[in-house]
Image: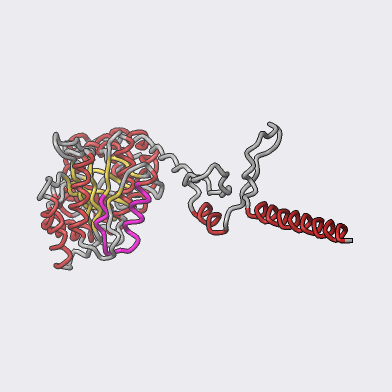
């Protein structure tokens, strides 16, 4: 009996030891990482996958470009595709526009040319006819002095030649009109870069004549002539002016210097634009200015300030005055005041196709003593062309 009792106690002890050992083994097994197995693995057996903590997963998504610190694959984040900047437009060649623009000008000025030819081709040219010729020229905004000069010259030639042949009358009138328009004036509008700095052009004018649009079109003209251009948005009073100018520039790959602050000092913006042009070694810097009424003394003084500030680092080589041809003689008053403040060197005449008053070209040139260099004959981006005296007169008489 004692022997059986001893055997039972031994069995119970063995079972207890085995139970405690098994429990301890299971506990150690649960605490081990899932991928700690280091024994041989079949090549087709995939590697164990570790589970990311929530914080780690969030960091990977917010920084998709950063390299992961472990060999684990980062979550895929779909990013928007980068869009390429649109290719710059190629402006129409400058001199290729003249034929098309001449046709438009001829249509808009038929009253002047055809009226004069009809009067001069009559069998009898008496004082009444000369009065009509004079009235036609005055209505075309030729101006009093140029009108009298032209009438006197025509009177003399008709008296001497006595011809009524339509072609001869046409040639005679063309010659006299060409003298008034003056083809000898320097109308160069494509300046050359100075040795150590760009050529600087200021563009001025009253409100509503389309200065910013004109500068945008001029940029296209210069780019078409293979010039490296930079624009300066010194019209800081009109909220949309800078963005409008930048849009024009972007279309042909021309940069624009502008201020992010509404109402910034325009002279400061102009100064920075010229400095950028010097640093970037561009050919031409064009400065847009705010439209101003010619009778506002403060605004006109500010225009002079812009010019003086620019000249601290470069000369202002050209001051172009933008005029609306449809304003007629009122444009002459504007031109005189601007010329006194900033020494206007050339005229850009817009909307010449919207008026039969082609004589304004002669009147402005006579008043200021400076040439019309560019004319606008439409709303298209390439509807700005160099002014050509002979083409203009031919269009009047076409």
Nearest the viewer among 319 and 125 is 319
- State the image coordinates of residue 358 (x, y, percent, origin top left): 29, 49
Choose top left, top right, bottom left or bottom right for residue 329. bottom left
**Image quarter hosting the C terminus:** top left
Q: Residue furthest front?
A: 2
Left or right: 187, with 64 as reference point: left
Nearest the viewer among 290 and 106 is 290
- State the image coordinates of residue 18 (x, y, percent, origin top left): 75, 54
Q: Residue at x 63, y 54 (%)?
A: 31
Magenta segment includes 104: no
The mark total stands at 0
**Placement of 83 over or under 163, stated as above or below:** below
Q: Residue at x 18, y 36 (%)?
A: 193
Residues drawn in magenta: 232-249
Q: Residue at x 37, y 42 (%)?
A: 252
Residue 127 visible in the displayed image? no
């Amino acid at each position: 009996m004692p022997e059986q009792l001893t055997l039972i106690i031994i069995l119970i002890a063995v079972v207890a030891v085995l139970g405690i050992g098994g429990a301890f083994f299971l506990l150690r097994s649960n605490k081990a990482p899932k991928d700690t197995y280091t024994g041989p693995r079949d090549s087709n057996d995939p590697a164990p996958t570790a589970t990311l903590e929530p914080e780690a997963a969030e960091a990977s998504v917010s920084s998709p470009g950063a390299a992961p610190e472990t060999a684990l694959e980062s979550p895929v984040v779909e990013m928007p595709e980068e869009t390429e900047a649109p290719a710059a437009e190629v402006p129409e060649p400058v001199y290729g526009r003249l034929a098309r623009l001449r046709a438009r000008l001829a249509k808009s000025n038929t009253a002047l040319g055809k009226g004069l030819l009809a009067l001069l081709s009559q069998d009898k040219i008496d004082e009444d006819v000369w009065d009509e010729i004079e009235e036609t020229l005055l209505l075309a905004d030729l101006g009093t002095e140029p009108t009298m000069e032209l009438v006197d010259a025509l009177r003399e030639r008709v008296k001497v030649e006595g011809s009524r042949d339509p072609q001869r009358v046409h040639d005679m009138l063309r010659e006299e009109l060409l003298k008034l328009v003056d083809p000898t004036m320097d109308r160069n509008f494509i300046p050359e870069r100075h040795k150590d700095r760009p050529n600087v052009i200021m563009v001025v004018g009253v409100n509503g004549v389309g200065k910013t649009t004109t500068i945008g079109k001029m940029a296209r003209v210069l780019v078409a002539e293979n010039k490296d251009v930079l624009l300066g948005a010194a019209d800081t009073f009109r909220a949309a002016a800078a963005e409008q100018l930048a849009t024009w520039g972007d279309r042909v790959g021309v940069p624009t210097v502008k201020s992010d602050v509404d109402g910034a000092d325009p002279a400061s913006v102009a100064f920075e634009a010229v400095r950028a042009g010097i640093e970037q070694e561009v050919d031409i810097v064009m400065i847009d200015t705010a439209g101003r009424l010619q009778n506002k003394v403060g605004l006109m003084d500010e225009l002079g300030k812009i010019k003086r500030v620019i000249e601290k680092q470069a000369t202002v080589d050209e001051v172009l005055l933008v005029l609306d041809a449809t304003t007629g003689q009122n444009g002459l008053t504007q031109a005189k005041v601007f010329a006194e403040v900033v020494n206007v060197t050339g005229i850009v005449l817009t909307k010449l196709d919207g008026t039969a008053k082609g004589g304004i070209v002669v009147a402005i040139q006579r008043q200021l003593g400076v040439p019309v260099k560019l004319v606008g004959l439409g709303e298209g981006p390439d509807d700005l062309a160099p002014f050509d005296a002979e083409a203009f007169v031919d269009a009047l008489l076409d």
